[in-house]
Amino acid sequence: MRLGARMFKTGLAVTLALYAAMWLDFTTPAFAALAAFFAVQPSLYKSITLIWDQIQANIISAVLAVTFVLAFGPEPFVIGVVVVLIIAIHIRWRREAIIPLAVVTAVIIMGSPTDDFLPFALDRFLLIMIGVFAASAVNMIFLPPNHENQLYHKLTAANDEIIQWIRLILHHEIDYSTLKQDQDKIRTSIQKLDTLFDLYRQERSLFRKKEYSRMRKIVLFRQMIRTTSKAENILESLARHDHVTHQLPPEVEEVIQHQLDALTNYHERIMLKYMGKVRPQSFTMDLEEVTEGRATLVEIFMNSEKHVEFKHETWIHFLPVIALIIEYSEELEHLDKLVDGFFTYHTEDNEVDIAAKEL
């Protein structure tokens, strides 16, 4: 089991909230720890943007809790009504992310009222706010996430897995049960990439120079993810039509193998170029080979329909694979141009903040 930065931040926020509550002499510091747990955010930008929403949510929850307890008493059904109201209000305001913390605030205040209910409610409210501020402080100061680094390494890991399986399928050396398991993992990885990209896209830099560079990287990473998705589509289509590849004329199968080998090599080198391990504009021959191979592939495949040994049904079934290969090559060309452009223009602003992956 891996312990990520967010786990450490959550533990640190809970610890800080407990110490702060004890230092301020609150009798139940555990409530501050609970609030800190719910208030920890996955990114610095979310922490900054949500802190005001969290304060507002806690105020609304506290007001509703106090009002309903004074009016109807602390009965369980009253607590349930308040929880429903809080959820409805925040859904209406499109603030779903802070619903758990808002509900916790209401339940803590309404859970065990005393005769001096207003001082009791204030005490609980302040404990919640201590937890919120502790979590925000930890988010902003300790272990800020490097989403660029995470995105790149997760992308390259997904690419390596996809490319490995494409090459095995082309040479008919796959174990289908293992492939199916890995395909599920690859789809999950790509979904996680989309989530991580959203976090990276939402981040903001305090310096305008770095923000311009980051916006260019957003375009780059969006294209990287799109290209990886195209490669995964090819893998899925090849796996589905693997029985058809055995029926292809040898010259067609050979061209497909050659083209996909060239494309996957091209993909790997583009990623290495962004990392700085390959010089920008250093493999024009690869691009020419990919372009020529694409034209050859289309020409041979279209002519193969007339091949005596090539059934029309087989030709129709394998046509989507050819279309995906063409799309993949076009996406790779676009990605290559974006990477070259990134290192050619505004070079004084563009910085790649990626640490080498630990072995």
Image (cartoon, rainbow, N blue to C red):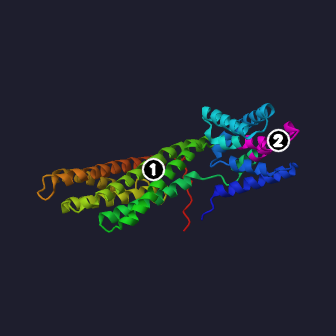
The residue shown at (62%, 49%) is: 42
Q: Is residue 241 above or below residue 78?
A: below
Quadrant the C terminus occupies: bottom right
Q: Which residues are magenta?
A: 104-131
The residue shown at (37%, 52%) is: 233
Amino acid at the residue labelled 2: Pro
Disc 1: which residue: 225
> In this rendering, would 189 be left or right of 116?
left
Which secondary structure lies at badge 2?
loop
Question: Of label 1 and label 2, which has the lower sequence position?
Answer: 2
Disc 2: which residue: 113
The residue shown at (72%, 35%) is: 56
Magenta-span inclusion, residue 112: yes
Which of 223/33 is in front?
33
Amino acid at the residue labelled 1: Ile
Residue 197 appears at what percent x and percent y? 52, 48
Magenta-span inclusion, residue 135: no
> In this rendering, would 208 be left or right of 259?
right
Which secondary structure lies at badge 1?
helix
Quadrant the N terminus occupies: bottom right
Q: CA distance from mark 1 to mark 2?
A: 52 Å
Query: How many neighbours does mark 2 have within 10 angstroms: few (below 14), some (14-19), or many (20 or more)?
Result: some
Viewer can see residue 291: no
Which of 163/52 is in front?
52
Query: How many neighbours does mark 1 have within 10 angstroms: few (below 14), some (14-19), or many (20 or more)?
Result: many
